[in-house]
Amino acid sequence: MSPLPEHLHQAAKGRTADADKRARTALAQMVKAGQPVSFTAVAQVAGVSTDFLYRHPDIRSLVERHPAKGGQLSGMRQADTEAPSSTSAAVRALSARLSQQQQAHREEIARLRKALEVAHGDNL
């Protein structure tokens, strides 16, 4: 498989840079307004996926530095000097993803059981 043509590579880089800028702007606006900061909230305001936020360590650490009830914009600058706890952040991110997947699987099982009941009823 050949690598992407240069124009597609440049377009992808541009989209990533745009998403990065939107995420940082959304985070700054939310912090300034005192809104709760979470990966989901920032992703919705910025129009990016939560996966995008988790995959970019610099943005992820900025989101993690703010309490869920909101923080101060100056807290971003002060926290930049502190070492991020990437291990615990990764564990939290994976735990949240696992919980979401478990819930999705439970819903799928319930839907399939319902369909199976209907099929059994039709067979009888």
Image (tube, rainbow, N blue to C red):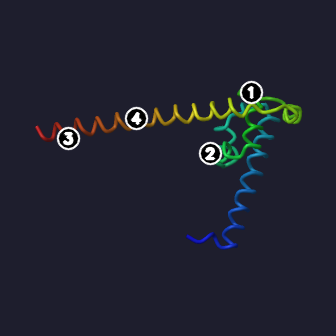
- Contact (CB < 8 A) between labels 4 and 1? no
Going from N to C along the chain, the mark reached first, 3 or 4, is 4
Residue at 74% x, 56% y is 18
Q: Quadrant of residue 123?
A: top left
Marks 3/2: CA–CA distance: 38 Å
- Contact (CB < 8 A) between labels 3 and 4? no
Structural crowding at the residue carrying mark 3, measured as other residues with C-alpha within 10 Å and reported as few (<14), some (14–19) or many (≥20): few
Residue at 17% x, 37% y is 120
Look at the numbered disc 4 and give the secondary structure of its residue. helix
Marks 3/1: CA–CA distance: 49 Å
Q: Is residue 102 left or right of residue 86?
A: left
Structural crowding at the residue carrying mark 1, measured as other residues with C-alpha within 10 Å and reported as few (<14), some (14–19) or many (≥20): few
Given the image, on which type of amino acid does mark 2 rest? Asp
- Contact (CB < 8 A) between labels 3 and 2? no
- Residue 107: numbered disc: 4
Q: Quadrant of residue 113?
A: top left
- Quadrant location of the N terminus in the rendered image: bottom right
Going from N to C along the chain, the mark reached first, 3 or 2, is 2
- Residue 119: numbered disc: 3
Q: Position of residue 116 (x, y in %)?
A: 24, 38
- Quadrant location of the C terminus in the rendered image: top left
Q: Is residue 51 left or right of residue 14?
A: left
Say above or below: 52 vs 115: below
Going from N to C along the chain, the mark reached first, 4 or 1, is 1
Marks 4/2: CA–CA distance: 22 Å
Q: Position of residue 64 (x, y in %)?
A: 73, 33
Which residue has dot 1 on it?
67
Nearest the eye: 59 or 81: 81
Look at the numbered disc 3 and give the secondary structure of its residue. helix
Given the image, on which type of amino acid does mark 3 rest? Ala
Say above or below: 60 vs 75: below
